[in-house]
Image (tube, grey):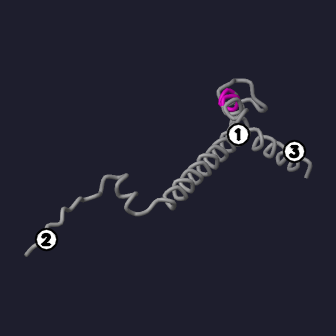
Amino acid sequence: MRKTFLLHQFQNAYRQAIRNSKYRWLVVLGTLLYLVSPIDISPDVIPLIGWVDDGLIATLLLTEVSQIVTESLKSKKGSAAASSARTTPEQEAEQIGQVIDVEAVSVG
């Protein structure tokens, strides 16, 4: 019970740190440095047990970074949709170069 509580506290602290734009790259670089470093919570010399902490940290990093990227793409897509909603279809066609000018000639 106590270990689970500590893991949740660590996960929440990590999530808050990586979502803070001021510290994001510091946390990512620190995590990568931890994964490469020979100094670990459990040494990598011990098979399986030594790799568990690295696997958990790497999984946590990939999960958080993928969520941040997904949210950023959704917000960009949402802002692009909002800005295109303010333009008329003719304006959109002009922006992407799909306008055909036709000169009318009266017959008769």
Query: Given the image, on which type of amino acid does mark 3 rest?
Result: Leu
* Residue position for label 3: 6
Figure quadrant of the C terminus: bottom left
Tell me what residue is drawn at x 52 percent, y 55 percent: 83
- Per the image, is 11 magenta? no
Q: Earlier in the sequence, mark 2 or mark 3?
A: 3
Which class describes the residues within 10 Å of circle 2: few (<14), some (14-19), or many (20+)?
few
Name the outermost residue toward the right.
2
Q: Position of residue 2 (x, y in %)?
A: 92, 48
* Residue position for label 1: 57
Q: Position of residue 25 (x, y in %)?
A: 66, 31
Spatial distance from mark 2 to mark 3, Cα to Cα? Answer: 82 Å
* Residue position for label 2: 106
Against 95, residue 58 (above or below) is above
User: Main SS of the magenta segment?
Assistant: helix
Tell me what residue is drawn at x 51 percent, y 62 percent: 85
Total marks in image:
3
Callouts 2 and 3 close, C-beta under 8 Å? no
What segment is highlighted magenta in the picture? Answer: 29-33
